[in-house]
Image (cartoon, rainbow, N blue to C red):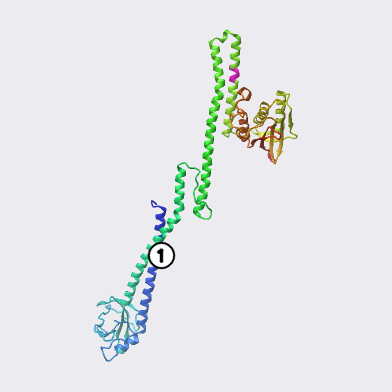
Amino acid sequence: MTLSLRGRLLIGVIALVVIGLLVSDIATYALLQNSLVGRIDAQLKSGQGEARIALGSPERGEGPPSSFPTGTVIELLGQDGSVVDAKVTAPPFDPNPPQGRPVLPKSLPNAGTDVPSPPFTVSGTNGVAKFRVTDWPEDSFHGDIVVLAMPLTDVESTLSQLLLLEGVISIAVVAATAFLALLIIQISLRPLRKMGAAAGLIAAGDLSRRVEPATSRTEIGRLGVALNAMLSQIEAAFAQRTASEQRLRRFIADASHELRTPLTSIRGYSEMLRRGASKSPTDSDLARRRIEEESVRMSALVDDMLLIARLDQGRPLETKPVDLQAIARDAVDDARAVAPQREIALNASEPVVVDGDDTRLRQVLGNLVRNALVHTPSKTPIEVAVTTVDSVARMSVADHGPGLAPDAAQRIFEPFYRADPSRSRDSGGAGLGLSIVSAVVSAHGGRVDVKETSGGGATFEVELPLVSQSD
């Protein structure tokens, strides 16, 4: 497993080719051997009559019929196994006739029988390695045994040439296969090498890079598609983490800045008391009042930050059926009491029930109405509405003030963000009201958005899921 993928594929391909060639060569050799030996056996079976004729020739020097292979031996064995007569096939006028003879076993296969024995193989002498032999008893020769033996020299020569040819062809095929397989593997693995190079750049920090090829037509292409999808998710996660870290740093900086003001005031008035404000009842009362006011303000600020932190952590809220119509009615009554000169309209003709935390939902609508009261001219009308749209409850607070700039509308729900940086903290608050609205609405599974009011101004819309009919 320490080899590369290219090496393992190459070894696998070559191993398969070698195994296939070995099986093919062995099968070819065995089939050819059986075919050639089968021909010899057929000649042995069909040549018995010619062997009798050759042995019955009055001239002992006359050889077997020319239809037998050169070097064929016909022997007549006596009852004691001695050679009574022998004939050998040789080309005419050959000065060096074949001298090979079969080495017969002491007990021939047909001993005690009167039928020819099946052909069998024996070793030979004088340069002939093997003979194919059959024998049978011959009544015309007083029961002597006739032995017909044909040399296997041509068969072995043919098989040897076949082995040499198979070896050369097999080596050539293996070499060609290795070269072509290596070339094909190199070309096929080129996309993987590109992916590896791209992955190295991505690991170095370039999360915007994507791997190629990325297509659904091939296996490697589908891998590229999956990797690119994963890289997109990783890039989005890193971007989200970076944005979250930036928000956290900004939140900590803004929170520190917001807490510094009341702490500075508390410290200053405490120093005033320590230096002798008690000698002046007026200064003493002022110091104690301001310390108390700044402490209350700091406590409220800390409570708001803790609320946002708890909601961001996903802590569950107390949920029960809540009527948004009642919440809207109370919020409008409170606003009218605070700003009697305002025209504040309510559009909530029927109960709208959602599952939620009554206190937090009242805080949501109260913050939106208070935001409209604080950031618009004193005579500007405000409309509060509670409706249902496509099985979703919608609360809206619309004003007709100066409205929001496009960049401010995108950041209006961030903690400590102020659309008007010049506004004082005493009149404008710490900038957590709309952040609390967003966090509470998200915790209820809803959404909040701001858009431009027709004719000018800003409209804040909150959408919450209605109570299901089964509930």
Query: Toward the viewer: 121 or 374?
Result: 374
The answer to if 292 sits in the magenta stretch is: yes
Q: Is residue 233 above or below residue 44?
A: above
Say which residue appears at 37% left-offset and 81% top-offset.
42
Provide the secondary structure element on which disc 1 rests: helix
Residue numbers of the magenta segment: 291-295
Are there few (<14), some (14-19), or many (20+) residues within 10 Å of tag 1? few
Say which residue appears at 37% left-offset and 84% top-offset.
46
Q: Is residue 389 left or right of residue 278?
A: right
Say which residue appears at 46% left-offset and 50% top-offset.
194
Q: Is residue 374 visible?
A: yes
Query: In which quadrant of the rendered view does residue 145 lie?
Result: bottom left
Query: Toward the viewer: 410 or 267?
Result: 410
Q: Amino acid at mark 1?
A: Gly
Q: Residue furthest right?
A: 349
Residue 250 drawn at (x, y percent): 54, 30
The answer to if 44 sits in the magenta stretch is: no
Residue 52 drawn at (x, y percent): 32, 88
Q: Residue furthest top?
A: 279
The residue pinned by badge 1 equals 20
Query: In which quadrant of the rendered view does residue 84 lie?
Result: bottom left
Query: Toward the viewer: 184 or 77?
Result: 184
Query: In which quadrant of the rendered view does residue 82 lie?
Result: bottom left
Q: Is residue 192 above or below residue 32?
A: above
Quarter of the C terminus within the rendering? top right
